[in-house]
Amino acid sequence: MDIEVAIKQLKGLVTYFERYREVGFMEAMVEAKEMASEMGPWVEPNFVEKRIIFRKKQFDEDGSEEVTQSVEESFRTHYFLLIVDQALGSFRNRFEQFKVYKTNFGFLFNLKKSSDESLKM
């Protein structure tokens, strides 16, 4: 594979995941609910709510720090965004590595494309 093609493909993949990070959760939710409804009564198309754990407040604590999230939003922030961000970081790292390889060794790939006669001179 040509390194320029690999860089172009990785750039497209990074762009796709950046867009998927913003709108992918809702698209995945719609698709998952459709799949669950097709499976019939065995699979319910909703999130199971966790039991809320209350703890005793100390005398100097203020209760205003607590922020409750919906079950969907909690899943989105703790699982979906975490996984997508890890994948995106990995792709960006690989993309940067390929760009460094191209700057350091790009002339070798250009030699491969040139004709044999020009190499003999």
Image (cartoon, rainbow, N blue to C red):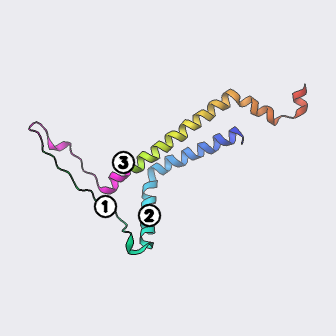
- 101 sits left or right of 63 in the view: right
Farthest residue in the left direction?
59
Q: Residue beneath label 3, please?
A: 78
Question: Mark 3 falls on what kind of element?
Answer: helix
Quarter of the image for residue 91 reads top right
Circle 2/circle 1 CB separation < 8 Å: no
Farthest residue in the bottom direction?
40
Q: Say which label, 2 or 1, has the lower sequence index.
A: 2
Q: Nearer the viewer, residue 36 or 42?
A: 42
Farthest residue in the top direction?
121
Q: Residue beneath label 1, please?
A: 48
Question: Mark 1 falls on what kind of element?
Answer: loop
Residue at point 72% right, 40% down? 2
Residue 36 screen position, x and y as percent: 42, 68
Find out whether residue 107 is within the magenta segment.
no
Quadrant where the N terminus is found in the figure: top right
Find out whether residue 74 is within the magenta segment.
yes
Quadrant where the C terminus is found in the figure: top right
Q: In this picture, which residue range is highlighted in magenta?
A: 57-78
Distance between mark 2 and mark 1 Cα atoms? 15 Å
> Can you tell which of label 2 and label 1 is closer to the viewer?
1
Q: Residue beneath label 2, please?
A: 32
